[in-house]
Amino acid sequence: MTAVGAPTARRLAAAGALAFMAAGALLIAASWSRWGVPCWPDLDSPACLTVQDHRFDYLLPTEPWTPLGRTAHLAGVAYLMLAVGMALVFAAARSAGWARGLQALLVGSALGIGLVTLASARAGEPIGFEWVILPWLLSPLLVATILVDIVSLSDDRAVLSDRAWCAWAGMLILAHPFLGLVLTMIAVDYNPHDTTPWDGMLGGGAFVGAGLIVLTGLATRRRAPAQR
């Protein structure tokens, strides 16, 4: 279990929340860079149909790939910030040793995604190592398991309430790449040429939401003793 004191845990969680919000803002910026000009407001415009091609996908790019502006750079840094945010929030939580291993797996996957995406952007071509995303693809199962451990160890000293932890975990699950793609397709209600327009916006919004939940939970938890 975590050995940090309550004030340190709160500072770690707050810093992690800010990192989550930065990650979300960067992902939203990457998505806007791809979709904003060509697809607003007409999803059937020639420019929008062009950028729907898979060769413009920027997260962990694979061949064939055509770099599009700074999209890959923004997405890569976003996942580095995500790794930082998760590491800090997990450090603030009371967890068993086995759960720390799962947490490290998630943090390492996000870090790997960010590094590989940035390296590809720098090289101007995919560098491989797409397997780093595998733990993140399992994130719903891993996050749910980690959540059970955190909630089972929760007490009055915990930085967040059980409800806040559950909401935070829900945001991470909502940011799953496949779930985000499906929900975006439903929300846009559009049959894409390849990649659904505005893909990436939901994941970015979920990361911002996760950060806001942590900050709100910290503020609520801090006021609770004074209200007793």
Image (cartoon, rainbow, N blue to C red):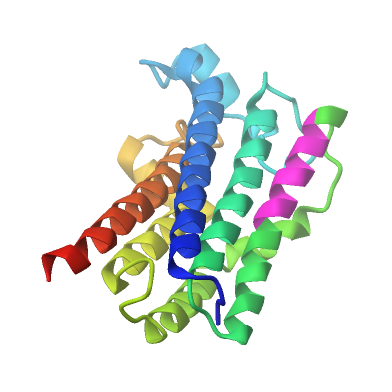
Q: Answer yes or no: is residue 79 visible.
A: yes
Q: Is residue 131 above or below residue 30?
A: below
Quarter occupied by residue 75: top right
Q: Nearer the viewer, residue 74 or 163?
A: 163
In the rendered image, which quarter contains the C terminus?
bottom left
Q: Position of residue 33 (x, y in %)?
A: 55, 21
Along the horizontal axis of the image, is 162 left or right of 10?
left
Residue at (76%, 32%) from the top-left corner? 65
In the rendered image, which quarter contains the N terminus?
bottom right
Q: Nearer the viewer, residue 26 or 133?
A: 26
Along the horizontal axis of the image, is 180 left or right of 41?
right
Q: Nearer the viewer, residue 98 or 13?
A: 13
**Magenta stretch: helix, strand or loop mostly:** helix
Residue at (56%, 36%) from the top-left corner? 194
Q: Is residue 41 above or below residue 111?
A: above
Q: Is residue 25 above or below residue 96?
A: above
Residue at (58%, 23%) from the top-left corner? 51
Residue at (50%, 66%) from the top-left corner? 92
**Residue extent of the magenta highlight:** 110-121
Q: Residue 188 colored magenta? A: no
Q: Position of residue 131 (x, y in %)?
A: 76, 60
Q: Position of residue 100 (x, y in %)?
A: 62, 77
Q: Is residue 70 above or below residue 176?
A: above
Along the horizontal axis of the image, is 170 left or right of 104?
left
Along the horizontal axis of the image, is 44 left or right of 60?
left
Quarter occupied by residue 45: top left
Q: Answer yes or no: is residue 189 visible.
A: no
